[in-house]
Image (cartoon, grey):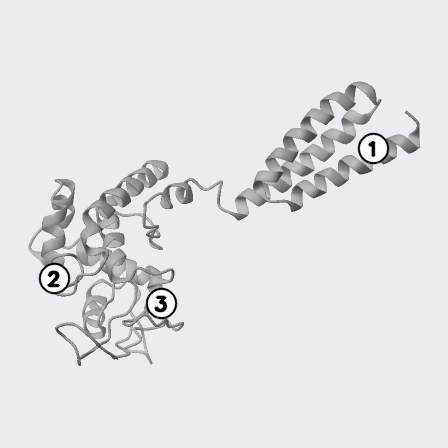
Amino acid sequence: MNSTSLQELKLRVSSQLTNLSNSNISKRFFAAGLVGISFFALSALVPNLGDFIEKEVRTSTSRISQFLESYNFGSEKEKVAVTNRFQIQSLVMEGGNPHIRALMRTISASEAYDDNPYNIIYGGQHISDLSRHPEICVTIPVGPNRGNCSTAAGRYQFLNITWSALAEDYHPAPQTFPNWGSYSFEPEYQDIVLYKWLSDPNAWGVNIAQSLESGNVNGVLQMLSPTWTSLGYGIETNSMSGNLPSIYQEILAEEMRIADIRG
């Protein structure tokens, strides 16, 4: 094979690898298999092609790795976090008791089942400013509280007065002058405040984590229903309410696997 033919062959191989990096994931893996077979055959026929091929394979492998990382396929946490039927997203907060974490996600499944649960307010609108609770009172159109208005906001639909009271006790970053009395409503803080509240036996008269660990999920949901009325035992059930016990079990399995991965 003359030098011109070898150069053409190199250009074709390089072009094939470039196409590999621009195709979708299934085509990438299929093309990578074909290219690998071609390398094996060509290396026996063309002198000095091995070094060129090795360099191109390393480049292609790097491109594929970057592609996978960009879609979080390499993240064990993400692999676990998308397995529940209703795709209830994980918490922003890291760590904590898996049972309480699963309960928090279960509450949000009925209270704020949305792609952006931390930014949603009562009625389904979204806000962008989470520097503090939005305190927007939206008229309730149906149900036993029709005609009243609700300030419920965020993943756990905290009322403004509830958030203020809880943040005073559980918020890790109280505001200072000139914003006395206000607390950041950023996603992590929504999680932390609720986690600490649910983990406080004095607030509920019972150790919720222990109740969950003993399998009393329905009892916990019933106990919390006066606070979150969509949990299946309150006055405002919805299409998710009846699924919450099974949703909790699916999410708990995820949280337990995540806890094992974290060690």
What distance separates the C-alpha of mark 2 from that of mark 3? Answer: 24 Å
Identify the image quadrant of the N terminus: top right
Residue depicted at x 38% and y 46%: 82
Which is more N-terminal, label 1 or label 2? 1
Q: Tag 3, which secondary structure?
A: helix
Residue depicted at x 66% and y 43%: 21
Q: Which residue is mark 1?
A: 9
Residue 29 is situated, as x and y percent measured from the top left of the image, at 60, 35
Q: Amino acid at mark 1?
A: Leu
Q: Do tag 3 and tag 1 residues touch (Cβ < 8 Å)?
A: no
Report the side of 202 relative to 106 (left or right). Answer: left
Residue 176 is situated, as x and y percent measured from the top left of the image, at 31, 74
Which is more N-terminal, label 1 or label 3? 1
Q: Amino acid at mark 2?
A: Gly
Q: Which residue is mark 3?
A: 119
Name the front one of labels 2 and 3.
Answer: 2
Q: Which residue is mark 2?
A: 234
Which is more N-terminal, label 3 or label 2? 3
